Image (tube, rainbow, N blue to C red):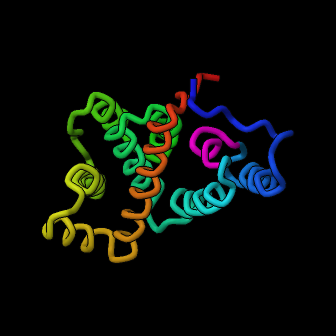
């Protein structure tokens, strides 16, 4: 059970209700997981969901690359909720099942695409070493461009925040529906 239960809508203050309604009316369609935790602080929920909306739906990265970065980050953090939420999206975006299986087993995948190899290496190096080498940075700029590299770091930062929230508040994995 999560350390903080989802807020009862009937007990939300006006700002919490406003943010809740904004999230529900957007592409997510519901409030769950880290968003439910952040709703305890309406302004954090508002700003985080805006950043999340950008990272997930409006970034210059293709969904295939974004979803790979998200899964790699979720795996590094052992964030089961986020992992379960994004495996279907990653597969639908074109990430191969063998890559998902390798990530799940915490082994280096064999990538068919150079851009996926780059996203994986960059995601792991930034999360685990707290920086990226000059050579990896240069590869990212060459392959993704400046804007794509900035977006990649934004996606990684946002999903690290999500993963931290999942781990700190013991957010339950998604149950099968």
Q: Residue furthest right?
A: 10
Is 123 or 1 nearer to us in this picture? 1
- Residue at 21% x, 69% y is 137
28 vs 171, left or right, is: right
Where residue 103 sits, quadrant-wise, is top left
Number of labelled discs?
A: 0
Q: Is residue 26 above or below residue 105?
A: below
Q: Where residue 49 appears, x then y in whole percent?
A: 61, 57
Image vertical order of residue 46 relative to residue 112, above or below: below
The front one of 56 and 52 is 52
Any magenta on residue 37? yes
**Residue drawn at (22%, 61%), measured in percent from left and top?**
131
Residue 35 position, x and y percent, is: 62, 46
Q: Residue furthest bottom?
A: 146
Q: Is residue 65 left or right of residue 174?
A: left
Residue drawn 69% across the image and 35% down it: 6
Q: Residue 126, position in %: x, y?
A: 26, 57
- Does residue 172 lie above or below 161 as drawn? above
Query: Is residue 14 found left or right of 97 in the rendered image?
Result: right
* Residue 143, image x, y percentages: 27, 69
Q: Nearer the viewer, residue 51 or 113?
A: 51
User: Overall secondary structure of the magenta stretch?
Assistant: helix
Q: Provide the residue span drawn in magenta.
A: 31-38
Assign the C terminus to one quadrant of the image: top right
The quadrant of the rendering that contains the N terminus is: top right
Is residue 81 magenta-colored? no
Q: Quadrant of residue 71?
A: top left
């Amino acid at each position: 059970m999560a350390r903080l239960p989802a807020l009862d809508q009937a007990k939300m203050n006006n700002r919490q209700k406003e943010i809740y309604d904004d999230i529900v009316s957007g592409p997510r369609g519901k409030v769950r997981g880290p968003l439910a935790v952040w709703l305890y602080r309406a302004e954090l929920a508002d700003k985080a969901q805006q950043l999340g909306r950008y990272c997930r739906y409006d970034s210059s990265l293709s969904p295939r690359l974004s979803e790979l970065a998200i899964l790699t980050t979720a795996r590094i953090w052992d964030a089961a909720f986020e992992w379960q939420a994004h495996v279907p999206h990653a597969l639908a975006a074109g990430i191969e099942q063998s890559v998902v299986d390798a990530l799940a087993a915490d082994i280096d995948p064999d990538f068919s695409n150079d851009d996926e190899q780059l996203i994986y290496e960059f995601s792991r190096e930034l999360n685990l070493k707290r920086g990226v080498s000059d050579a990896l940075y240069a590869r990212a700029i060459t392959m993704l461009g400046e804007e794509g590299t900035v977006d990649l770091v934004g996606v990684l930062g946002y999903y690290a925040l999500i993963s931290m929230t999942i781990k700190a508040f013991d957010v339950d994995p998604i149950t099968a529906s």
